Amino acid sequence: MRLVCYGVGVPGVPGCAYRTKHRTETTDFKIVTRGWLDVRNRDSAVRPSPVVEGREYRLRWAVQPQDSVVGKGDRLGVVLISTDHDCTLRHPSGTRMTVRTGLSSVTLLVALPAGS
């Protein structure tokens, strides 16, 4: 593997990475968009709020805007992950979170095709 440097870097991060080969796969599923919320920063991006064990929280977050065509008969799914190692702080090992699916909802903006 070849080392590629992108700039001077900062202390602790040299600004270099090794070139890698990416493996691609074919699947019946497609990620349409993504969204993030760190529950500890649910009220402010700059000021954390403690999470109290056993307390329920109402959380709302937006996803990245993305135009997609969903065909008749296609199904949409939602995947919730407790930690995104690239975008959120990690919770201590063993942390459990519960989603009340009967009270949860997803709101989609829908536009009909032109001429409909």
Image: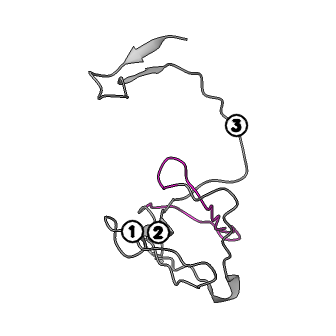
Indicate which disc, 3 or 1, sits on the residue closer to the N terminus. Answer: 3
The residue closer to the viewer here, 82 or 27, is 82
Instruction: Give the number of the disc on residue 72.
Output: none
Tag 3 secondary structure: loop
Residue 40 x, y percent position in the rendering = 46, 69
Query: In the image, which disc is placed on residue 48?
Result: 1
Residue 8: x %, y % from top left: 26, 21
Secondary structure beneath dot 1 equals loop
Q: CA distance from mark 1 to mark 2?
A: 5 Å
Q: Mostly what secondary structure, the magenta segment?
A: loop
Q: For the magenta stretch, what is the residue range?
A: 66-89
67 vs 31, nearest the viewer: 31
The disc placed on residue 40 is 2
Residue at the extreme left: 8
Q: Residue at x 50, y 79 (%)?
A: 59
28 falls in the magenta region: no
Disc 2 marks which amino acid? Answer: Arg
Mark 1 / mark 2, whichever is N-terminal: 2
The residue indicated by pointer 3 is: 25
Q: Earlier in the sequence, mark 3 or mark 2?
A: 3
